[in-house]
Amino acid sequence: MAEPTSTKPYLLRAVYEWCVDNGYTPYISVLVDSETRVPMEHVRNGEIVLNIAADATSHLKMGNETIECTVRFSTVAKELRIPVAAVTAIYARENGRGMSFGLEEKEAAREAGGEGASAPTDPKDPPKIGRKPALRRIK
Amino acid sequence: MAEPTSTKPYLLRAVYEWCVDNGYTPYISVLVDSETRVPMEHVRNGEIVLNIAADATSHLKMGNETIECTVRFSTVAKELRIPVAAVTAIYARENGRGMSFGLEEKEAAREAGGEGASAPTDPKDPPKIGRKPALRRIK
């Protein structure tokens, strides 16, 4: 039988829908590399946090391989393209609840080189990212 | 702001969709109590494993509070009703991949009394169920 696809894009969509249904603003953290099309001026330590709420984006498409949308930064609309593998977390801005993902192979190489992903944290229960892939549900 | 709803039903639907898209058979493990309507003759150690694939059920509704469907056992169709809180895992029959959930309060009381949930295991990486709620993504 063929190797199964990753559950990750399904879980990203699930948390996105949970945010929307609860009136929260879905944020994603993304590790930036040459395959990631994001506004580089907003990248900090190799990472960018993006608001992907419906009122902050247009043409949002959360596919199994990539997340694509158009986002307005200041007065300029930019088309973003983010490989699902580069997403390290999705969470509600209002309370930090959501899900973080361990680094996959591509990002692990980057992690070894210096800056890595930082997941949203709950002060009472910081994420424990160990083996790859790993995740935790916040709440 | 109101307490957010649980992400669990969203994640259950996500893994279900992942199973369907990959041609796998989605199974759920359920802790049985007085609020769980399942065929008691198939309950083992307080738990039942159910095939909720489209070809094994009809009228499947995976809601935020309950999972409902009609399942045929032998020649008898039975309407099942499973609180989302009672679901301990959802996974693909073919490879055991999916997601397990820690016991929530109601089930924790039962756990203390004797039989508890057993999550699907990967021989290479058995689930570590500790604090509640906890989960792991298998793969």
Image (tube, coloured by chain):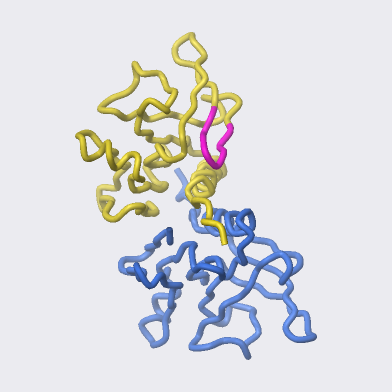
Chain colours: A yellow, B blue
Provide residue A95's location: percent of width, then percent of height: 38, 42
Name the residue at 25% across, 48% down. A123
Provide residue B100's location: percent of width, then percent of height: 45, 66
The image quadrant where one finds the N terminus of chain B is top left
Name the residue at 40% across, 46% down. A97
> Which residues lie in the magenta part?
A61-68
Provide residue B25's location: percent of width, then percent of height: 62, 67
Determine whether B93 is above or below A120 in the image: below
* A124 left or right of A55 in image: left
A4 or B82, nearer to the observer: A4
Q: Classify residue A58 by image quadrant.
A: top right
Q: Secondary structure of the magenta portion, mostly?
A: strand
Determine whether A64 is above or below B7 in the image: above
Extreme residue toward the top, this view: A75
A91 or B27, nearer to the observer: B27
Determine whether B37 is above or below A104 in the image: below
Provide residue B61's location: percent of width, then percent of height: 69, 61
Extreme residue toward the front, this view: A1
* B4 left or right of A121 in image: right
Name the residue at 38% across, 25% down. A34
Determine whether B53 is above or below A45 in the image: below
Q: Classify residue A27 by image quadrant.
A: top left
The image quadrant where one finds the C terminus of chain B is bottom left
Q: Classify residue B48 by image quadrant.
A: bottom right
A20 or B13, nearer to the observer: B13
Extreme residue toward the bottom, this view: B41
Q: Is residue A139 magenta?
A: no
* B107 left or right of A17 in image: left
* A136 left or right of A19 in image: left
